[in-house]
Image (cartoon, rainbow, N blue to C red):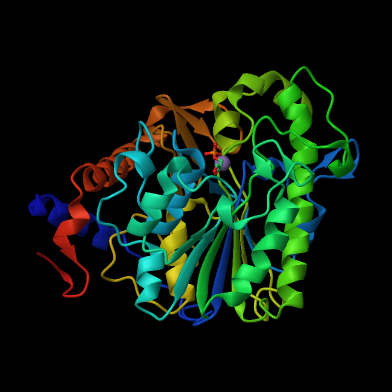
Amino acid sequence: DSSELADIENYIRANEKAPEKELFGIAKNRNVIIVSMESLQSFVINNTVNGQEITPFLNDFIKQSYYFDNFYHQTGQGKTSDAEFLIENSLYPLGRGAVFFTHATNEYMATPEILKKHGYYSAVFHANNKSFWNRDIMYQSLGYDNYFSQEYFNVNEENSVGWGLKDKDFFEQSIPYLKTLPQPFYAKFITLTNHFPFELGEEDKMVPEYTSNSRTLNRYFPTVRYMDESLKTFIEGLKKEGLYENSIIILYGDHYGISENHNKAMAQYLGKEEITPFDHVQLQRVPFIIHIPGVTDKHPKVISKVSGQIDVKPTLLHLLGIDTKNDIHFGQDLFSKDKMDFAVLRDGSFVTKDYVFKENVCYDKKTGLKTDISHCEPYMEKAKQELDYSDKIIYGDLLRFYDNKIKKIK
Ligand code: GP9
Ligand code: MN
């Protein structure tokens, strides 16, 4: 009931960090272009396969952006859709099932809905069947104005591979639609080509496959490279169409691509003897990039604060100059001086500045070795509390008791 929400709100207010003054509103009224990069993990960034760069475009783009290199995905079984849920609500997805399916008609206060109050138009672009992950229903609850799903795209045998339309064609066909949107807009793009089982035509392979006992890991590198190239084409397209300068561009990896079934091959690639539970948690890092033309190109930064997808909503809103004092969210503004080094994964593992906790074992981050549990204890309660509170909001549909307009609980 609503008294549960009062407890949760107290917790959230106590955790809130003041935004950094210099960045608050730095992207005010700009278009927001946000890209979900399928299965992209951080270990490929600034890395090579057979001596060739895997993500040359992103490596270069990062040098003109804010890049977060200790940013974790926090998704569960809902995969891409869980990442979308985290990014736009700053709530955790569920421990079982996909919240896009199980709680699609809940009351939410997602970024598209908030931005609408500030004059934004919002749309999603994704070349898959509109009901996949129940998106057609969920996007209404998140406040989207339009969903450019598969039926808006020209998909044929030549321009498809694996799950469907190839990323390059997807971006190329999206830009004419993007041009028609009322501005400022909030537009989300969801890529597809770098999806398990990482199929790609020979003509699109710009780096060779890796050689190991895992065909999955071997094939991952060429499809990552292909997605990287498609992002380059997209940014060039935005520039050509005059949609670049007045935008803020955000890129995030949605979740891991290489599961622990491929640990042996992964250890070989990383030059390690084995992938320990500690390494496994570290492999849950995904790239997070904020690019603000005229700002981040002048003063790029690599930010190593421990963070996660949960932190994106308050961060973005503050960059747009929108205050979040009355918003229910579990993340913290990544630019706030007091932002805690903290990320809870959906399985209850967590990461702090100095420690990693997984399955009741505490690891020292510098060495990766087991350390006394007492080092992790101060955070164990907080990690549980966050997931519990977030679950309570979703299972109880508690945001229907929260009236953002009158700033108090009904
Ligand atoms: C499907 C795409 C991939 O539309 O988002 O989904 P995933 O399997 O990664 O959740
Ligand atoms: Mn995905």
Up/down of 91 relative to 315, above or below: above
Residue 407 visible? The answer is yes
Up/down of 31 relative to 167, above or below: below
* Image coords of residue 339 (percent x, y): 43, 60
Q: Is residue 181 left or right of residue 376?
A: right
* Image coords of residue 223 (percent x, y): 76, 40
Residue 59 visible? The answer is no
* Image coords of residue 92 (percent x, y): 36, 46
Q: Quadrant of residue 294?
A: bottom right
* Image coords of residue 276 (percent x, y): 59, 23
Quadrant position of ligand 1 = top right
Residue in view at x 48 percent, y 47 percent? 83
Residue in view at x 41 percent, y 81 percent? 119
Q: Is residue 145 left or right of residue 212?
A: left
Q: Nearer the viewer, residue 403 or 73?
A: 403
Q: Is residue 59 left or right of residue 149?
A: right
Q: Nearer the viewer, residue 44 or 374?
A: 44
Q: Quadrant of residue 400?
A: bottom left
Q: Where's the C terminus, which quadrant? A: bottom left
Residue in view at x 31 percent, y 39 percent? 102
Residue in view at x 59 percent, y 72 percent? 248
Up/down of 372 relative to 75, above or below: above
Q: Nearer the viewer, residue 141 or 278?
A: 141
